[in-house]
């Protein structure tokens, strides 16, 4: 099993696979910090809707590879593999820009803030969680979509519990320390 996932770890662990998303996020942060542009409600909704469509298209863009697994390295597969992280991060950056640069502020219920933080932490922990779940024999024997759908709530619950622990003991304390340091520097 370790041999099967070695390639996956190599793909995730190499820094150049994350350069595009990192650069887009850095450029967006710089742009928001340095400009004073405000979007109308309609433009904001249009950009947000477009970003959601782009994100969903990027996620489901892998399907032709699953439908035709023996097709080899086609131009589509090579381009998708090379660009999907950057395109998906562009969709996220557009969504962030649409919401941050909006003229009127939108009141968001507290539950969305909590879910956003937990989801981010679940993302940070997804590779260790994948390795843990790959060593659970029952999960390896699930061969139908129905079995996977039956265990998905269990897996999601464990992932979000781990995310909660990570938030309480790592992200929140470091965030408070960095906030104090930034206030003292600036």
Image (cartoon, rainbow, N blue to C red):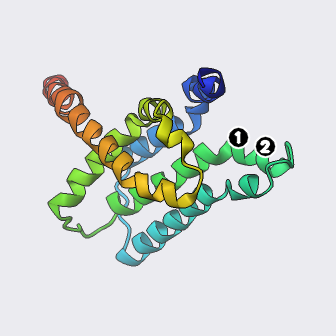
The quarter in which the C terminus is drawn is top left
The image quadrant of residue 73 is top right
Image point (38%, 68%), residue name: 39
Q: Residues within 10 Å of mark 2 (few under 14, many from 20)?
A: few
Secondary structure of the residue carrying tag 2 is helix
The percent coordinates of residue 163 (x first, y second) are 28, 39
Q: Is residue 186 visible?
A: no
Q: Residues within 10 Å of mark 1 (few under 14, many from 20)?
A: few
User: How many marks do you count on the picture?
Assistant: 2
Q: Is residue 12 visible?
A: yes
The percent coordinates of residue 159 (x first, y second) are 34, 42
Left-right relation of 138 to 6 = left
Q: Nearer the viewer, residue 147 or 22?
A: 147
The quarter in which the N terminus is drawn is top right
**Residue position marked by numbered label 2 in the rendering:** 78
The percent coordinates of residue 151 (x first, y second) are 42, 52
The image quadrant of residue 83 is top right
Mark 2 touching mark 1, by CB under 8 A? Answer: yes
Disc assigned to residue 82 = 1
Q: In the picture shown, does residue 146 fall above or below 121?
A: below
Image point (59%, 44%), residue name: 86
Image point (15%, 24%), residue name: 177
Q: Nearer the viewer, residue 44 or 11?
A: 11
The image quadrant of residue 16 is top right
């Amino acid at each position: 099993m370790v041999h099967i996932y070695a390639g996956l770890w190599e793909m995730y662990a190499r820094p150049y696979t994350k350069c595009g998303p990192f650069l887009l996020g850095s450029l967006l942060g710089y742009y928001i910090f340095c400009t004073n542009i405000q979007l109308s409600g309609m433009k904001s909704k249009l950009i947000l809707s477009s970003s959601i469509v782009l994100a969903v298209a990027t996620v489901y863009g892998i399907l032709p590879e699953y439908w035709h697994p023996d097709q080899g390295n086609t131009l589509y597969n090579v381009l998708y593999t090379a660009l999907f992280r950057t395109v998906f991060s562009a969709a996220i950056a557009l969504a962030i820009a649409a919401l941050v640069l909006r003229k009127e502020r939108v009141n968001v219920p507290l539950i969305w803030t909590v879910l956003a933080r937990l989801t981010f932490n679940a993302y940070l922990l997804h590779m260790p969680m994948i390795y843990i779940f790959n060593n659970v024999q029952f999960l390896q024997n699930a061969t139908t979509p129905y079995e996977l759908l039956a265990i998905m709530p269990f897996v999601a619950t464990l992932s979000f519990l781990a995310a909660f622990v990570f938030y309480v003991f790592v992200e929140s304390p470091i965030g408070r320390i960095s906030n104090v340091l930034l206030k003292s520097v600036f």
